[in-house]
Image: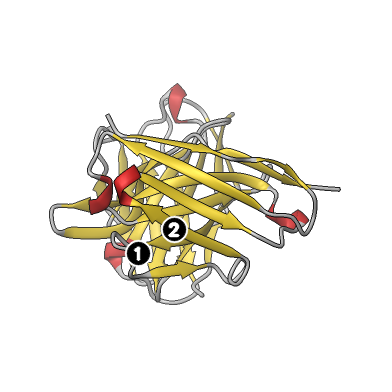
Amino acid sequence: EIVLTQSPGTLSLSPGERATLSCRASQSVSSSYLAWYQQKPGQAPRLLIYGTSSRATGIPDRFSGSGSGTDFVLTISRLEPEDFAVYYCQQYGNSRWTFGQGTKVEIK
Amino acid sequence: EVQLVESGGGLVKPGGSLRLSCAASGFTFSSYSMNWVRQAPGKGLEWVSSISTSSSYIYYADSVKGRFTISRDNAKNSLYLQMNSLRAEDTAVYYCARFFCSGSTCYYSFDYWGQGTLVTVSS
């Protein structure tokens, strides 16, 4: 099973700042099968990025994804108040799906 | 509008059973593989099980294999999860989620989620 490790655990930033979230895999992940989600308290996760770098429908262009192999990054170019939430990366491989443990982006 | 509505959660004793349902609407249910994903209180997300469109391919996380059974009824636009031999560590919100596909390409990510149903396993 591929283990995804996200860092940092918590990111304390101010609105307008840039957020850089990391997701590292224990073995190589196909770029087609790496996704990012946003989850706010009491809500279901929302798909942000699929296929490493493609934005899902309705996702603002301040969200971008990049990476390959074992290292992937989600970047939020300028944080809006509604962006403070928990973010998860997720991968598919060998008929198994795994999620990272999450990065919480909180208001500084 | 795509909607996924879970039901069937509740309080059950260790060793007990529960059946979750997910009612789908707003899309052609029979054309999409479906999934269950769970989240223990205050914890992260854990994939539980997946089922293909015609139920030909079914996968389980090791943590539930042999105890949980996923199924679907395309005529009723419904997804199910039969949970047996429940343990305290199965306590979680269980989400029904649809696989994301764009055209003929599926990316094995989850684009629509239900609101979740809480399963609590406790004596």
Identify the residue at horizontal 36%, vertical 70% (top origin): B57
x then y, percent, for residue A7: 55, 55
What is the C-alpha distance between the residues marked 1 and 2? 7 Å
Identify the residue at horizontal 80%, vertical 50% (top origin): B13
- Above or below residue B100? Residue A67 is below
Residue type at the position of mark 2: Ser
Identify the residue at horizontal 28%, vertical 46% (top origin): B29
Location of mark 2 (residue): B71
Residue type at the position of mark 1: Ser
Secondary structure type for disc 2: strand
Q: Chain of mark 2?
A: B
Q: Chain of mark 1?
A: B
- Above or below residue A42? Residue A67 is below
x then y, percent, for residue A52: 30, 57
- Looking at the image, do the residues carrying marks 1 and 2 touch, with CB atoms under 8 Å apart? yes
x then y, percent, for residue A17: 43, 32
Secondary structure type for disc 1: loop
